[in-house]
Image: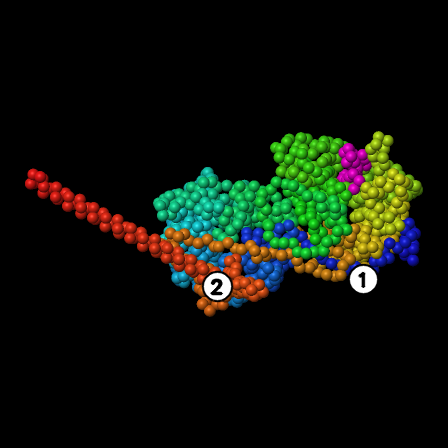
Amino acid sequence: MAHLFRGKQAGIASDLSVGISSDVFMLDEFARYGVNSQISVLAYDPVQSLLAVGTNESQFGAGVVNVYGQKRVNVTFHPPRPSSIRAIQFCADKLVVLDSKNDISVFSLDSKHMLANYAPPGHVTAILTDPSLDYCLSGLQNGEIVAYDLDRESITPFKIPNLWRERNPRARLIPVVSLQFHPKDIGTLLVGYSEGAAIYSFKQNKAIKFFQYEVPRGAPGGDADPAAVDQVRHPRLTHAIWHPTGTFIMTAHEDSSLVFWDPRDGRAVHARTINETDVNQPGRGSSRSGPGGIAVKEPYFNISWCSKENADDTGILVAGGSPTTNPAHGLTFIDLGLTPNYQTSSWDYLAGYFKNPKRTHVLPAPPNAQVTTFLTIPRVSPHFAGAHDPIAVLAALSSGELITMSFPSGHPITPTNQLHVSLTFVHPFITKTALAYVDRTRWLGMREVRQHGPNILLGGAAGTKPLKRHENRNIVQAAHADGTIRVWDAGHGDMIENPGMLQVDLGRAVGRWDQLDVTQMSMSGATGELSVGLRSGELVVFRLNRNQFAGQPPSDPGSNGGPGQMTDICRRADPNLKEGLLPLTMTNDQQGPVTALRHSDVGFVAAGYGGGGVTIVDLRGPAIIHTALLSEVVGSKHRSKSVRRSGPTSQSVEVATAMDFGIMTLDGDDYSSLALFVGTSHGRVATFKILPSQTGRYSAKFAGVTQIADDKVISTSPIDTQTGSPAAATGHAMAGLQSGRKVDGVLVVATISSAHIFRPASAKGASKTFDQYLCDSANVVRFEDRGYALVGLFGDGAARAFSIPALKEIASTRVNHILHTKRFGEAVVTPTGDILGWAGPSEVAMVNVFGAGLPLPPSPDRLYDPMKMVPPRPTISSLQWIAGTQYITPSDMDILIGGADRPPSKRMIAEMRAAQESEFQRQREAARTGRAPKPDPNQESYWAYMQRQLAERTENLGLAGDSMDRAAETSSSWSDDVSKFVAKQKRQAALGFVTSKFGF
């Protein structure tokens, strides 16, 4: 009876929801984008070209590790227990993760599963891996170092005791602060303790050098504390780092000192801070940044000793260490230049190298933000502590955001089409999102061409997903805090054919770089045009086009037009953008912030303002064709319309909260027309009719208004009464108006506390009140070909479906375990039943209400490419080797750490099996053809490789010995010839003396 009664009230004869039942209303989660919590650590693998991002545990979920590759490649790894991620390191085909629960987890990049989980015998303060080793060294709080075999998945008997007790036996708690292998000698380990640093030799199994920083009396030290000048100080160590070639060692301390050491004799070469030099010399501390008072300095958050392609051309990148009063925050780069030749340089010359760098400059960070950690992006090599020839720097800020800068210039790099779309959520934060239902063919052609540097992420491969060719695309528009808008495809859980992003630079379009707070966005599903409304009142329109001013220097933006005027902003396009979403036009009615916005598919844009005004723009001019104030719009009892001039009242201003264009026959008309439906904050729905004028343009006029509720309208959806399909303003429907086609339509409206179906402009229709809950977001949704329903998100954490026209609740399902209930008002319900909602501060989830109750599926993407081999580790020079330097190979380390009885690793066994299988294949081929098998020069087993390496090494040793023998023989023969020559000269001199005496 409710169906018949409300259908008669609404003017709908049939049940449009007959094929939808409670059995089909189940939640499927199919995608997540963004970062679930604050970023804690970053790691990069230049061989596989992958980026790993670890997060902290928060109320929105446990910390996870997301590994990103090219385009949309993304795989998430979860630690075994809810915890925060403290450290991440790539090691060949494995990912080693340390969490706050003191667990070390080993994940396979190939299988994307956890291989092992290990709890070290103590609190872990530092971990160290190397791509050429199958071990993970863990530095403990008690100062010991233990090793875990990543290949055999077991702890090894190898252990390094607390080396610092040899230097200070009375010390109690001396934790390991840092670990780092020698850049060119993996058998040498630099261990940083809280009191100092030590160099450990695996070959000698002992510490060979100690480094302890001492500030004598009268020296200012790094903090220049006048109360401690008369004391001998030993500042605690925070970092210990090798020079890229191992020539020097640098230690950083709590007093902001940077101390450079000679690893051969253990002496300090120079001590300085970022701005001062000779801070360990009594009375000799000098400032390079000019006079100034003593200021508290930031601690050192992260330090990297970088090098260019030539490993001797180095510089130090520092996060922290600057005075807190310094207005320029960011990363400090100390460019040292080419390293002096150690053998031929004097001590003073070496000290001057660190005292007088080539230059020192700041890679700037956003205002009021502090860099907490950073990651250098090397071009090729995974060695040299990941700091060899970096192309860019990725920095995490105290605010939780990311910034990407070129290195060493520090110019900002846009993450658009450089980083994964999830990382753009914090690059910087997203302030507003919108979702458009864009035609698939149109979206495939929407690609931008922009000048940018080399791609940072090239690894991985997208997995196989179903392809939904006949569905429109869920296109997200995300506005960021810096005025950047990025447009991308969120998909339907299917294969995304166009994974690229489009970037809109709002600051260039409006001609300023502040007050760029976006309040509303709307995109046309047919044309791809984008309209943006700002809090400052501007309405800006962008259109996909080629930039005719690309490559030209930016011109003067000029002034913007006043109220009621459209300003041409085509020349304000980014010169680096050749093709993309370009500025088209803008207007500012100066009526307050934009509160509602709708961009139609037929060339009209409607905007509502905080002052209560409504503006309709025809983009064919472009021109403003109608303006109205909602406070002046009233409706009479007999459905006629009028405009009331009223003075200010004590009530709040009535503003537009929801808008939509539709084509239907309005109540009282005998023809169909294009109409704009405006829902307000006072529960009214106003209708404006748009008709062609005699001048060839379009004009708009007020058609009527109806009061449906006392609270805010959140959605307006025009539908066809015969089929239930949207009575949308499309190009096809507009063309039908010329032939007299009529659309019998109604308007489905949802407010916070009720739902309504009526025939606009002012008919009464049917309604339903939500008594137990409040609605935050709603839309009319289609389920396959079975019918349509009104789907909404409600404040009790559930999604509900209501039939049309009976408005009877069909089913409900809980969604607050995925989506954040307090942000339901920002969620978007699409016409296919997909819901885009916030799952956390910087993470959105995509769910579908017509599913099977399935959770988020694991990623099918592939990360590891076995064809990308890790390059050989750098080694010591030939002169160092000939001079007697004890060089240890990674194979030697297997014996020293794993023991002599350690069997071959799984990787070696796999190589041997592959080589054996290849050999069997050649033998079978030879037996089939009757020919002798030919050895495959490209296939070489591990043992053959080791034998060849040993033979080559022995041969090189022999050649070196032969060369030395030949040099010795040549030197001996030359000495004999000199002796013979001297003896001959003596004989001739004596003979000449004798003959002269006898008168000959």
User: How far is mark 2 from mark 1, CA to CA?
Assistant: 62 Å
Residue 223: x %, y % from top left: 46, 47
Circle 2 residues within 10 Å: few <14, some 14–19, many ≥20: few
| Image quarter hosting the N terminus | bottom right
Residue furthest to the left in view is 998
Q: Is residue 105 visible?
A: no
Give the labeled residue for mark 1: 23
Q: Residue at x 84, y 56 (%)?
A: 786
Q: Residue at x 29, y 53 (%)?
A: 968
In terms of depth relative to the viewer, which is nearer, 576 or 406?
576
Query: What SS does tag 1 mark?
Result: helix
Residue 525: x %, y % from top left: 76, 44
Q: Residue at x 86, y 41 (%)?
A: 736
Kind of residue at disc 2: Trp
**Image position of 347 (left or right of 784):** left
Label disc, if present, on residue 943 of the rendered structure: 2
Residue furthest to the front in view is 930
- Name the dominant secondary structure of the magenta segment: strand
- Report if the CB atoms under discs 2 and 1 are less than 8 Å apart: no
| Image quarter hosting the C terminus | top left
**So how many labels did they put on this image?**
2
Q: Residue at x 88, y 45 (%)?
A: 743
Kind of residue at disc 1: Asp
Residue 285: x %, y % from top left: 41, 43
Is 606 contained in the magenta span?
yes
Q: Is residue 831 visible?
A: yes
**Image position of 504 (left or right of 796):** left
**Image position of 878 (left or right of 827):** left
Residue 33: x %, y % from top left: 67, 52
Q: Which residues are magenta?
A: 601-628
